[in-house]
Amino acid sequence: MKTKDNNYWFPAKTYGWGWSIPNSWHGWAVLAFYLLAILLNTILVQPVYGQLVSLLGIAAASLVLIAVCWLKGEPPRWRWGR
């Protein structure tokens, strides 16, 4: 899905609120690091420190992903389709 301005790493969804899949390598790199953080958190942190610390790590990684989407993505608003 291409947007009018290719400077956005994450285009807006066609329907609803939020962002779609990345449309640049920058966005794909951010998404890959997010998935890697979740995987490493599950493999390394959860067995040692427990579920609560693991959940906090996942929440922190998710907040960072949302912040990057907010800063580098198309401005979010409710969309009914184009």
Image (spheres, rainbow, N blue to C red):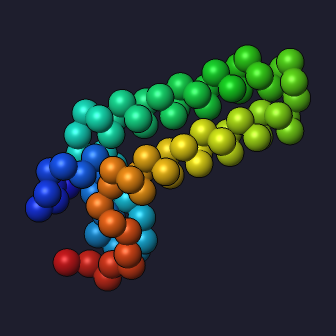
Q: Is residue 74 above or below residue 67?
A: below
Could you tell me how many numbered marks the image carries? 0
Image coordinates of residue 34 in percent, x first then y, are: 51, 34
Residue that appears at 28% across and 46% down: 9
Question: Which residue is more in the foreground, 47 or 53?
Answer: 53
Question: Which residue is more in the foreground, 14 or 63?
Answer: 63
- Say which quarter of the image contains residue 56: top right
Residue that appears at 80% across and 26% down: 46
Which quarter of the rendered picture does the C terminus lie within?
bottom left
- Can you name the residue that lies furthest to the bottom here? 80
Q: Is residue 74 above or below residue 68?
A: below
Image coordinates of residue 3 in percent, x first then y, are: 16, 59
Which quarter of the rendered picture does the N terminus lie within?
bottom left
Residue that appears at 41% across and 35% down: 30
Left or right placement of residue 43 versus residue 6 in this view: right
Residue that appears at 14% across and 57% down: 5
Image coordinates of residue 45 in percent, x first then y, are: 77, 22
- Can you name the residue that lies furthest to the front here? 71
- Say which quarter of the image contains residue 24: top left
